[in-house]
Amino acid sequence: LDKLKSKNYNNPFTSLFIIDDDPSNINLLLSQISLPEILDVCSQLSIKVELLIDPDLQQLKNRILKLLITKFPLSSLGIHIISQPVLSPNLIQLTSWLHSPEGLTPQINSMLGFPTDELNQVLQSFWTSLVDSNHIKLLSNSHMSLGTACVVASGPSLDDNLEWLKLHCNELVILASGSSLYTLLKAEIKPDALVLLERNDDVYLEISRLILEGYELRNIPLFASSTLDPRVLPQFKTVIQFHRPQSATSNLYPNEADSFLPQAGPHVVNATVEVALHLGYQQLILLGCDFGTTVRHKTRSNEAYDRNTRNLNLAMPGSKGQTIYTEPGLINSANFVDTILGFSTTTSYRIGNGSIMSNVIET
């Protein structure tokens, strides 16, 4: 406080968060400092002050994440932590999460995206709105009970369970997530719908390759982000459009609130799970939703069309007791899926072996 009050001090701070998991610690703090004086000094220096207290570690993380994304998105680029000498177990874990390579900063980046991505998404969304205005808007049927949907992603365990899916495909609504499409088609399993998210032209090129190889895609309903490459859309007869809430395009559609998914990222599997919840499915089966691998060199299904290299160099306990290898982006994706399932009343099952998730029933 003395430094902040000094006229010669070059203030580098834009915000001040006071965080604890125990209200009695805040009471003790307030007995030692003058809160009105701190608020007055911070106000003069245009420093925003936020007080966050929650005994639940996950809720504390969620509140910090939401606050930074909605009010202080650049703060994660330079966090300075001043901690008390003795921390509670929750605050020790929170401090670790703030600095972790799969913690706060990559989660914010995965939700907000990058400048080049955002620019391209705006351009593609504009083009789609102006040229192809006949697409259907995704509407929420979350009050309805639509039975069981199978969300299929391109994790390595998909290959081990294709025969099971063939056996039960007539009993399920199969929602193919991005690059899992090729694996399903090669196995002669036609999905009931496809979900695509990424804005780059790789998606268009791979969809074109599937068509050139003779696969009939036109009659598969497509759930597409409004930021998708617009060249993809004419390849499908039925296109249902959804919006990404953290995208720069979100403010372009103020009258389409019902078409916004809660997160819709960072990966297409996140959007696929959210589409299923948005539509009202009361049971989900997650297949190929591994977010890691037990065999380090096998990072996805053999036939998945996404050939981007994944460096799975983080070893973690897996859902079935085996060590799995993963990376920060997949950890964040798994956390977002687990969180959104935790907020729903849907019962979710997972087939395979992957990251530990608390809101799915492992089979």
Image (spheres, helix red, strand yellow):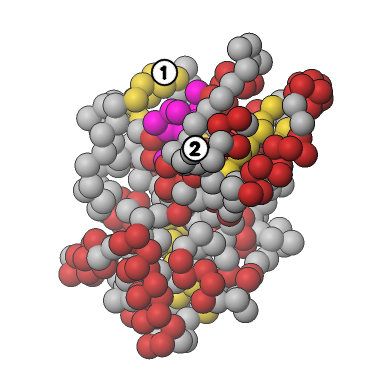
C-alpha gap between disc 2 and disc 1: 53 Å
Q: Residue 100 magenta-drawn?
A: yes
Is residue 231 something that shows in the picture? Answer: yes
Point out residue 15 in the picture as x, y percentages from the top left corner. Answer: 58, 43
Q: Along the polypeptide, which appears first: circle 2 or circle 1?
A: 2
Main secondary structure found in the magenta portion: helix
Corner quadrant of residue 235: bottom left
- From the viewer's side, name the closer residue of 298 and 342: 342
Q: Is residue 1 above or below residue 162?
A: above
SS class of the residue under badge 1?
loop
Q: Is residue 26 visible?
A: no
Secondary element at image label 2: loop
The residue singled out by tag 1 in the image is 322
Query: Which residues, given as a range, are shown in magenta?
Result: 96-107
Q: Nearer the viewer, residue 36 or 331?
A: 36
**Which image quarter: residue 204?**
bottom left
Of discs 2 and 1, which sits in the foreground? 2
* The N terminus - image quarter: top right
Residue 353 image offset from top left, x and y in percent: 43, 29
The image shows residue 138, relative to residue 32, as above or below, that is below
Q: Quadrant of the C terminus?
A: top right
- Classify 93 as above or below 236: above
**Residue at 35% across / 75% down in the picture?**
123
At horizontal 36% and vertical 30% (from top left) the residue drawn is 326
The disc placed on residue 9 is 2
